[in-house]
Image (cartoon, rainbow, N blue to C red):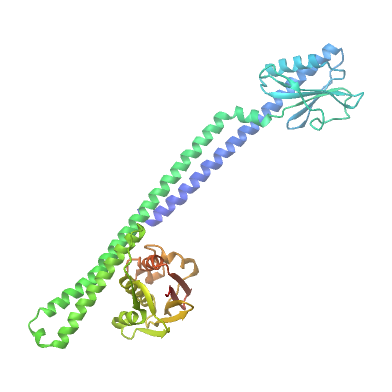
């Protein structure tokens, strides 16, 4: 499956998941709105029946629309006569049961002689319990009618939530299923990405290991010839080539092993005190005139693992040369900063964009710079440098401008 197909699949799946979630939320909202309308309609009809029964008992004429909804949870009922609390309780409970309004509610009767609510009681159609309700700010009064009572449903949202239990649970199950689908898709894509990284790493590693092996094989063939014994200068040069390539091969293998050890926190450093200037000069010998060295440090002695120190400097220089232009300008500089030795590797190459300056230290990350992306390498060089610097408790800094070059600085505390 191509990368383009996977990207389209991810986009389509994301849109599908969003569509399912939005649709589910829409239907739940529609169902809640429908419940609200049904509840209000049933409450209107039930309270109209109560108003009609009270009108018959009081012997007055019932108005055309005795019920008025003043808020989502408050209803006002015009009675045109004084209302008896016990009778009102009986009629309301009976009417609410008839219209399937099984919920808690509060009833308040308005007294026109005192201009206040003279009766307030919390009732329920779930049971026969009742208790006094507050008669202050919970009730809305009006000047339209001299005699009326009010009904409040303080737990209306709870009532709707209870009636929507099945819909809510089905929505939760749908969201859980969608979440598992998204997680499974993420794991699949992650595994594919790791598989691609592993394949690229194996390919790059095979290519990198073949180069020193081929060089050693050619040098060995030359050293195996009979005439080489009579040419000591040439013989020494090819022996040096074999030794250098073996060191290079050992460094590449050790770098991979060190990365694995560092990830498991079992990397062991063999520290010793040595002159960093002399070490750097020996590292620069194979690079001939490609790299300049400026030693501006008075004290260059440090405590470090010599093998890993050599590999770190080699990696930084090799990286600077790889990502330079046709004529590389690479320089290594050392200077003292307080009680620290700073080693800076500078180049005037293609530079690193700001969005990649943190990612380049991630394992296997390669900057997509067109053809430059095809530069040979494992993709773990800078990650290895970061691991070794961290293991020594040093500091690694990067300064880079796209198109102008990069500078890697290692700050090493000195005794």
Q: What residue is rendered at 16% in x and 78% in y? A: 219
Question: Which residue is most to the right?
Answer: 113
Residue 263 in view, yes or no: yes
- Viewer-nearest residue: 353 or 118: 118
Give left or right: position of 232 versus 21: left
| Percent coordinates x, y for residue 9 in the rendering | 42, 50
Q: What residue is rendered at 87% in x and 20% in y? A: 80
Looking at the rendering, which quadrant does residue 413 occupy? bottom left
Instruction: Decide: is 31 above or below 373.
Output: above
Q: What residue is rendered at 28% in x and 65% in y? A: 205
Image quarter where the C terminus lies is bottom left
| Percent coordinates x, y for residue 153 in the rendering | 72, 27
Q: What residue is rendered at 28% in x and 63% in y? A: 203
Residue 65 in view, yes or no: no
| Percent coordinates x, y for residue 404 in the rendering | 47, 78
Question: Which residue is most to the left?
Answer: 226
Looking at the rendering, which quadrant does residue 36 occupy? top right
Give left or right: position of 61 versus 121: right
| Percent coordinates x, y for residue 56 in the rendering | 83, 12
């Amino acid at each position: 499956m191509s990368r383009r197909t996977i990207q389209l699949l991810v986009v389509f799946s994301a849109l599908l998941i969003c569509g399912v979630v939005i649709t589910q939320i829409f239907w739940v909202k529609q169902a809640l709105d429908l419940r609200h309308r049904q509840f209000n309609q049933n409450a209107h009809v039930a309270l109209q029946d109560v108003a009609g029964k009270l009108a018959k008992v009081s012997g007055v004429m019932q108005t055309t629309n005795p019920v008025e909804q003043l808020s989502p949870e408050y209803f006002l009922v015009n009675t045109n006569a004084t209302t008896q609390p016990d009778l009102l309780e009986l009629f309301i409970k009976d009417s609410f049961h008839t219209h399937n309004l099984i919920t808690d509610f509060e009833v308040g009767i308005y007294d026109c002689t005192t201009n206040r609510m003279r009766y307030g009681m919390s009732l329920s159609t779930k049971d026969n319990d009742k208790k006094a309700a507050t008669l202050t700010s919970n009730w809305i009064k009006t000047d339209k009618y001299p005699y009326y009572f009010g009904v409040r449903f303080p737990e209306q949202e709870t009532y709707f939530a209870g009636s929507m239990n099945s819909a809510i649970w089905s929505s939760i199950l749908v969201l859980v299923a969608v979440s598992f689908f998204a997680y499974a898709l993420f794991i699949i894509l992650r595994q594919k990405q790791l598989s691609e990284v592993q394949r690229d790493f194996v390919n790059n590693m095979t290519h990198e290991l073949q180069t020193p092996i081929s060089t050693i094989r050619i040098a060995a063939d030359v050293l195996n010839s009979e005439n080489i014994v009579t040419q000591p200068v040439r013989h020494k040069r090819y022996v040096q080539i074999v030794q250098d390539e073996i060191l290079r091969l050992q460094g590449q293998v050790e770098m991979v092993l060190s990365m694995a050890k560092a990830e498991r926190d079992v990397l062991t450093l063999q520290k010793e005190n040595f002159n960093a200037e002399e070490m750097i000069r020996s590292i620069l010998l194979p690079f001939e005139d490609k790299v300049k060295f400026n030693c501006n440090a008075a004290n260059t002695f440090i405590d470090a693992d010599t093998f890993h120190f050599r590999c770190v400097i080699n990696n930084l220089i090799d990286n600077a040369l790889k990502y330079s232009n046709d004529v590389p300008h690479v320089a290594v500089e050392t200077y003292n900063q307080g009680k620290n030795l700073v080693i800076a590797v500078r180049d005037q190459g293609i530079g690193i964009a700001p969005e990649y300056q943190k990612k380049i230290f991630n394992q296997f990350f390669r900057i997509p710079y067109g053809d430059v992306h095809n530069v040979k390498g494992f993709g773990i060089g800078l990650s290895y440098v970061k691991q070794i610097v961290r293991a020594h408790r040093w500091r690694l800094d990067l300064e880079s401008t796209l198109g102008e070059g990069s500078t890697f600085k290692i700050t090493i505390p000195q005794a």
